[in-house]
Image: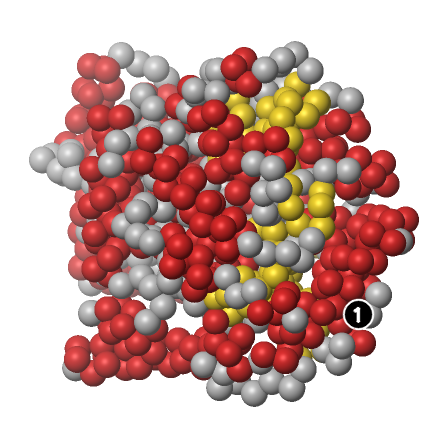
């Protein structure tokens, strides 16, 4: 194995309809390699299999054929080294912020003091210090997503998978969260695969943008984004890239 | 007031005792000597305590068996496929119909009464627990998996807390039904308890004491409901709307 | 707003009551000779009723009898009488007297049987004195069996407090089995539930009810107060059919037993055994009612049983018996 962090090798995923016997090929021969510390965004038309791919990497689904390797190890099921953040937060409503974030360490049966330390560290990292004892029902959308991110980070994952995490936030909060995420990413430089519908968001965040083909899903094109952080939405280069990628996707839909 | 008016209209004290006579009867029952062993408590409260004890024991058994079985059936598909037909077969049988069998298996008095109350409380607790476990949001289970939780950890750290509101509702309903089964339960050869007391005064055709007993059942049932609701709200505080 | 609501609810409740009340005052029209008669579950004492029905004696008297029941207990049947669901009924004298004491208007118009109950115990018990601290089941507190058991204990210087009594929550049909399985040590019931244990071989009759009070009345026919007034002819016809049935039982014992088996769903040998202890008769005696009331009051006053009827309820048993018992139909 070469030194790539994540290798997705010709992965195919077929869903078989239990009743009709008909099947859908969600992904066909999808291949991609990710470097350590890289920020990659996945974009594409609706239903192109972005979420399915993420689930495969997370180990929540099994590939029909092909393989996935993280640090040279085959991915066969879910694991703490691949953290996942959902669009709808999926916080445990009966746990407060701190206990949500401490879930991973708790599962590891770390001593209480250690769990608290890790949790508070991550809570600080996402800018929620002082909210440790609030419950999810008391938090705004943005705050909830921060908790979700903190929770994933508390496990010190090797790879962070994010499925349209800011999709249910309003524009203002979204912009804020994007900047915050870049800040957090800068601290540790963990590799991130970020799925999104918004090309603008992808260009703002990623070092590489992968455009997917749909039905069945596979890699269509890859755009390196060589702009310096922090990027400006009004930059000419930014806008040019955004237009190019948008057109690329539109081709698929059209 | 409506009751008083209707009772006056009826003019058949045997069938429709007026609230005044019922209140008087309540008082009489309160001061009359209690059942053996509880003479000091008075007839009304003594019998109530006896019935309460039976219901608490029956309910505790129902809670333990119902929640335990409910978790198994709600969480594991195989268990569900195996046990569901049996449960659906037994569930529609009303507790009253079990009386002869209860007396055959358990004899008289305490044991068959507890059995019948267990029967009444068991099914709502079981079904609500199953529902709660089955309704565990898939997303939460997936998240737990990506955080490294193993099978049993997911059951106890995600499944159970998620099912808690449903389980609590089942417990609340269960004890309500269990309490309502009192009269039927005490028809299994009891000679004490509120249900027995009601049947006793029904036989001696003392309608106002019969209704007084029924009123007591209603009052205690209501208090139990309130008590449990408060407990539920305390435990499930995180559900703040 | 609240007043209107209460008024409406009151009206609704009242209208719901008019229906039974209407039935009571005879507002509900009924065919001239139609009559609803009730009876008790599995009670061999009501054999004359079963015979009169099956042999068409009622029809021959021009009656259209609607059989209502069986009722699970005397008080249940009396409640139905009070509510106008039945017009006449075969029932124990004790519930009838109790109902009358609770101001339900009724008349006892004929006897049905005497005696026919007994105290059954396991084979190990030899005397009444040995009943101390044992478990004994009896029918409900309002029944004659309950009172007679109290009388028996009083005769032997015992009271209900000396043993564990289960009044009313073990139904007579379940009593033999409870004795057999050892759940109870004895029971006091009416036929055929006495015979069942004897024939089954696990019980014996320690005391027959006739030994406690020879010739004691057991079941009677009652008619609702207003019904007797307005349907004199019908009541008389019912009793004529009833008397014919009693004669029939005497002269056609085998046929009578077959009818008994059909209505009580019991075996022939149990019925055979039971019929030895039952005496069917239409005779009716005010003194019997007076004595019964007296015994009930006395037992309550001595504390042998919990008071069911006190002298406050029936201050003058004589007058009470006069108003409740109506012998004109059996004297015709």
Question: In terms of depth relative to the viewer, which is nearer, A145 or C76?
Answer: C76
Q: Residue at x 73, y 21 (%)?
A: C202
**Measured from the top left, where is residue A9 in percent x and y?**
59, 36
- Label 1 environment density (alpha carbons within 10 Å; few <14, some 14–19, many ≥20): many
Q: How many marks?
A: 1
**Looking at the image, which residue sits at the far left?**
A130
Q: Quadrant of the N terminus of chain B?
A: bottom left
Depicted B49 relative to depicted C253: above or below: above
Looking at the picture, tell me which residue is in the foreground, A56 or C286.
C286
Q: Nearer the viewer, residue A206 or C250?
A: C250
Q: Pointer 1: what residue?
A: C57
Which quadrant of the figure has residue C201? top right
> Is residue C100 positioned above or below B202 on the image?
below
In the depicted structure, whether residue B74 falls above or below residue B65: below
Q: Residue at x 38, y 52 (%)?
A: C317
Asked if residue B227 lies left or right of residue A10, the reply is left
Name the residue rendered at 27%, 72% in the picture: B8
In the rendered image, residue A122, in percent from the top left (x then y), is placed at: 21, 29
For the residue pair A162 and B117, the one nearer the viewer reads as B117
Seen at 22% across and 40% down, the residue is B30
Where in the figure is residue C252, as x and y percent of width and height?
A: 89, 53
Q: Disc 1 sits on a residue from what chain?
A: C
Is residue B147 rendered to the left or right of residue B112?
left
Image location of residue B45, percent across then percent down: 26, 35
| Colour scheme | secondary structure
Can residue A110 be seen here? The reply is: yes
| Viewer can see residue B169 | no
Q: A15 left or right of A99?
A: right
Classify C314 as above or below C271: below
Tag 1 secondary structure: helix
């Amino acid at each position: 194995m070469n030194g790539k962090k994540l290798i997705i090798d010709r992965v195919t995923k077929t869903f078989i309809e239990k009743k009709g016997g008909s099947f859908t090929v969600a992904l066909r021969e999808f291949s991609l390699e990710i470097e350590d510390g890289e920020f990659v965004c996945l974009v594409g038309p609706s239903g192109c299999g972005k979420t399915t791919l993420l689930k495969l990497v997370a180990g929540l689904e099994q590939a029909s054929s092909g393989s996935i390797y993280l640090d040279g190890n085959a991915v066969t099921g879910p694991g703490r080294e691949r953290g996942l953040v959902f669009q709808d937060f999926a916080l445990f409503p009966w746990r407060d912020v701190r206990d949500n974030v401490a879930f991973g360490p708790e599962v590891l049966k770390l001593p209480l003091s250690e769990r608290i330390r890790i949790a508070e560290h991550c809570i600080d990292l996402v800018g929620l210090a002082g909210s440790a004892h609030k419950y999810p029902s008391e938090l705004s959308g943005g705050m909830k997503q921060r908790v979700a991110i903190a929770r994933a980070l508390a496990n010190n994952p090797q790879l962070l998978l994010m499925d349209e995490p800011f999709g249910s936030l309003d524009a203002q909060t979204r912009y804020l969260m994007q900047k915050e995420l870049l800040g957090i990413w800068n601290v540790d430089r963990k590799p991130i695969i970020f799925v999104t519908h918004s090309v603008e968001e992808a260009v703002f965040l990623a070092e590489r943008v992968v455009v997917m083909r749909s039905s069945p899903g596979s890699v269509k094109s890859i755009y390196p984004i060589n702009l310096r952080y922090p990027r400006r939405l009004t930059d000419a280069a930014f806008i040019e890239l955004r237009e190019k990628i948008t057109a690329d996707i539109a081709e698929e839909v059209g | 007031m409506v009751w008083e008016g209707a009772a006056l209209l009826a003019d058949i004290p045997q069938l429709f005792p007026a609230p005044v006579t019922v209140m008087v009867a309540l008082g009489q029952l309160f001061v009359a000597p209690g059942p053996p062993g509880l003479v000091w408590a008075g007839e009304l409260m003594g019998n109530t305590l006896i019935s309460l004890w039976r219901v608490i024991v029956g309910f505790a058994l129902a809670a333990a068996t119902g929640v335990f079985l409910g978790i198994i059936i709600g969480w594991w598909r195989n268990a569900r496929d195996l046990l569901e037909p049996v449960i659906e077969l037994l569930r529609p049988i009303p507790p009253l119909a079990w009386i002869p069998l209860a007396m055959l298996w358990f004899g008289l008095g305490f044991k068959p009464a507890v059995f019948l109350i267990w029967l009444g409380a068991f099914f709502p607790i079981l079904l609500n627990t199953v529902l709660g476990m089955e309704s565990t949001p898939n997303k939460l289970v997936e998240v737990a998996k990506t955080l490294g939780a193993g099978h049993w950890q997911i059951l106890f750290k995600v499944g159970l807390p998620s099912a808690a509101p449903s389980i609590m509702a089942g417990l609340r309903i269960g004890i309500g039904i269990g309490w309502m089964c009192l009269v039927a339960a005490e028809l299994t050869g009891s000679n004490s308890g509120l249900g027995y007391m009601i049947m006793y005064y029904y036989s001696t055709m003392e309608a106002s004491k019969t209704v007084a007993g029924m009123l007591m059942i209603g009052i205690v049932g209501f208090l139990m409901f309130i008590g449990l609701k408060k407990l539920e709200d305390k435990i499930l505080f995180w559900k703040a709307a | 707003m609240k007043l209107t609501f209460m008024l409406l609810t009151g009206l609704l409740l009242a209208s719901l009551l008019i229906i039974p009340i209407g039935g009571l005052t005879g507002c509900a029209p009924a065919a001239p000779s139609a009559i609803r008669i009730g009876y008790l579950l599995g009670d061999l004492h009501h054999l004359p009723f079963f015979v009169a029905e099956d042999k068409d004696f009622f029809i021959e008297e021009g009656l259209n009898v609607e059989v209502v029941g069986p009722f699970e207990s005397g008080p249940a049947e009396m409640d139905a009488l009070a509510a106008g669901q039945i017009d006449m009924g075969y029932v124990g004298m004790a519930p009838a007297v109790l109902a009358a004491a609770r101001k339900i208007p009724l008349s006892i118009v004929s006897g049905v049987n005497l005696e026919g109950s007994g105290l059954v115990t396991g084979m190990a018990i030899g005397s009444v004195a040995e009943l101390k601290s044992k478990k004994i089941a009896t029918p409900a507190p309002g029944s004659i069996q309950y009172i007679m058991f109290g009388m028996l204990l009083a005769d032997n210087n015992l009271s209900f407090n000396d043993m564990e009594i289960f009044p009313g929550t073990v139904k007579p049909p379940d009593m033999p089995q409870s004795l057999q399985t050892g759940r109870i040590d004895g029971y006091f019931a009416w036929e055929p539930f006495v015979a069942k244990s004897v024939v089954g071989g696990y019980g014996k009759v320690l005391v027959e009810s006739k030994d406690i009070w020879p010739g004691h009345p057991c079941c009677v026919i009652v008619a609702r107060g207003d019904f007797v007034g307005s349907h004199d002819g019908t009541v008389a016809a019912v009793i004529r059919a009833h008397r014919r049935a009693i004669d029939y039982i005497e002269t056609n014992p085998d046929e009578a037993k077959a009818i008994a088996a059909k209505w009580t769903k019991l075996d022939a040998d149990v019925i055979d055994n039971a019929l030895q202890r039952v005496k069917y008769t239409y005779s009716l005696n005010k003194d019997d009612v007076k004595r019964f009331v007296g015994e009930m009051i006395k037992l309550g006053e001595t504390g042998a049983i919990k008071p069911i009827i006190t002298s406050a309820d029936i201050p003058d048993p004589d007058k009470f018996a006069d108003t409740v018992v109506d012998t004109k139909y059996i004297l015709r």
